[in-house]
Image (tube, helix red, strand yellow):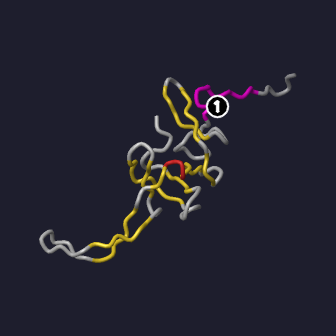
Amino acid sequence: MERIRKGDEVIVITGKDKGKRGVVLMLVGASRVMVEGVNVVKKHTRPNPMKNVTGGIADKTMSVDRSNVMLFDPATGKGGRIQIKETDGKRVRVFKGNGNLVGQSSAGKSAKTAGKPAKQAKKKVAGGE
């Protein structure tokens, strides 16, 4: 199971785009990811009338190494480390800092309580001990 997947919101932790947040557009090979709005370079193209291509300078998003990004944790507002746990026979990604499942809001269940049934409150009897 991959710790970072397509569609995850990540934050860049090192390099020229340090601190930028974006969504993973695609995984490139085993160790690189393309993140929206991160590592944008200028691509110079020559005009080619045979292929109906106009020349000019275009922006192109390049990939960054997977080790340079962290999954963004909305509960803390920072990047978080990921742990893979098995819950109800399924492997799920969990933030190590607070135990929340990846892809759920901070109001959602944490991995610690995901497999356990909810405790029912004891009823108080009026006039009882």
Image vertical order of residue 15 relative to residue 101, above or below:
below
Q: In which quadrant of the rendered image does the C terminus lie?
A: top right
Left or right? Give the position of 71 relative to 57. right
Asked if residue 121 lies in the magenta stretch, the reply is: yes
Residue 38: percent from the left, percent from the top? 47, 62
Q: Which residue is at the front of the view, 4 or 32?
A: 32
- Identify which residue is drawn at 72% across, 29% down: 121
Residue 103: percent from the left, percent from the top? 52, 44
Q: Which residues are magenta?
A: 111-123
Image vertical order of residue 14 relative to residue 84, above or below:
below
Left or right? Give the position of 118 relative to 43. right
Residue 50: percent from the left, percent from the top? 12, 71
- Identify which residue is drawn at 48% across, 49% down: 8
Asked if residue 116 lies in the magenta stretch, the reply is: yes
Q: Which residue is at the front of the view, 69 or 116?
A: 69
Image vertical order of residue 49 relative to residue 62, above or below:
below
